[in-house]
Image (tube, grey):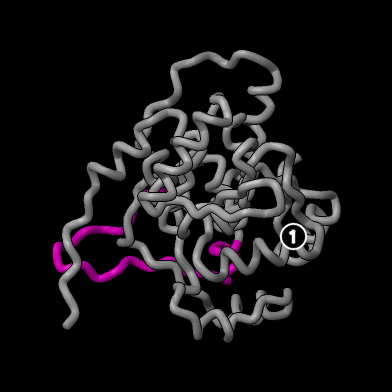
Amino acid sequence: MEHPRRDPDIARAARLIASASRAHMLKALSGGRPLAASVLAEEAGVTPATASVHLRRLTEAGLVVGEQRGRHHYYRLASAEVSTALEALAVIAPAAPAPVASLRVSSRENALRRSRTCYDHLAGSLGVGLMETFVSQGLLTGTPKAEEDGRGPDLPAAYGRALEYHLTGKGGEVFGRFGVDVARLSTRRRPVVRYCVDWSERRHHLAGGLGAALTGRFFTLDWLRYGVSPRVVHLTETGRRGLADTFSFEAPA
């Protein structure tokens, strides 16, 4: 007999994320790449021993998963839903009050806003710009969902599901020629097209199976490369030309 799911313990999840150190670790992991415990300790600004305590708590709560690789322990987010929750919180979170302490910190913040991964898909101004290009070129279409309460479509900075994006026939052809197996995406449980509200741009970027497949393809073609900092990605010159030729998207310099 299947038992009904109990109410989610939101307070417990909030307490886990409320720790600044754990929040820094989760944000670093939201780029989708497994990171060593030592890297996460540095991101959180704590000692390795303290980081171990925090990571154990996150693992026990089911927010992260750890694995041993030789002498090092690596961690990743347990699911895309964790990243989605963090991105949603970032939309409503107040800006950090601390002033920028160095040129290095400022450069990193600018890089995150320019282009980063949100779990397994592209975010930042690059991700938002591509999403808008796909819509304007008719590769995706956005339509309001029929809601019983009469709500209108999401505002650009809203985080809901009142607006649905759909892959068009033209989009299927264009993405198929680019090397994305759209037919295979449609057979999986994961939605082909979803959106996240980008915390830095306050607009939508492409998520779902299509967003992940496109981002993976960009890396395969060397259009994107990971930066030194977690989450940060850089558009290569090959990628800049490729986006212009394939999708008529002119990435800002």
Residue at image point 52% right, 33% down = 51
Q: Does the magenta segment cover residue 143? A: yes
- Tell me if 245 is positioned left or right of 112 in this view: right
**Circle 1 crowding by C-alpha within 10 Å: few under 14, some 14–19, many from 20:** some
Instruction: Tell me if residue 213 can be seen.
Output: yes
- The residue lying furthest to the front in this view is 71
Looking at the picture, does residue 83 appear above or below residue 97? Answer: below
Mark 1 residue type = Phe
Residue 14, picture quadrant? top left
Q: Position of residue 29 (x, y in %)?
A: 55, 46
Which quadrant holds the N terminus?
Answer: bottom left
Taking depth in this image into account, of 106 and 127 the one nearest to the observer is 106
Looking at the picture, does residue 181 appear above or below residue 148? Answer: below
Q: Does the magenta segment cover residue 189? A: no
Q: Position of residue 95 (x, y in %)?
A: 43, 25
Q: Please tell me whether mark 1 sits on a helix, a strand or a loop.
A: helix
Taking depth in this image into account, of 227 and 46 the one nearest to the observer is 46
Residue at image point 75% right, 66% down = 246
Instruction: Magenta stretch: give its range.
Output: 134-156
Taking depth in this image into account, of 217 and 56 the one nearest to the observer is 56
Residue at image point 67% right, 76% down = 180
- Tell me if 98 is positioned left or right of 139 in this view: left
Which quadrant holds the C terminus?
Answer: top right
Instruction: Tell me if residue 129 can be seen.
Output: no
Q: Position of residue 37 (x, y in %)?
A: 60, 40
Magenta stretch prevailing secondary structure: loop
- Give the labeled residue for mark 1: 219
| Callout count | 1
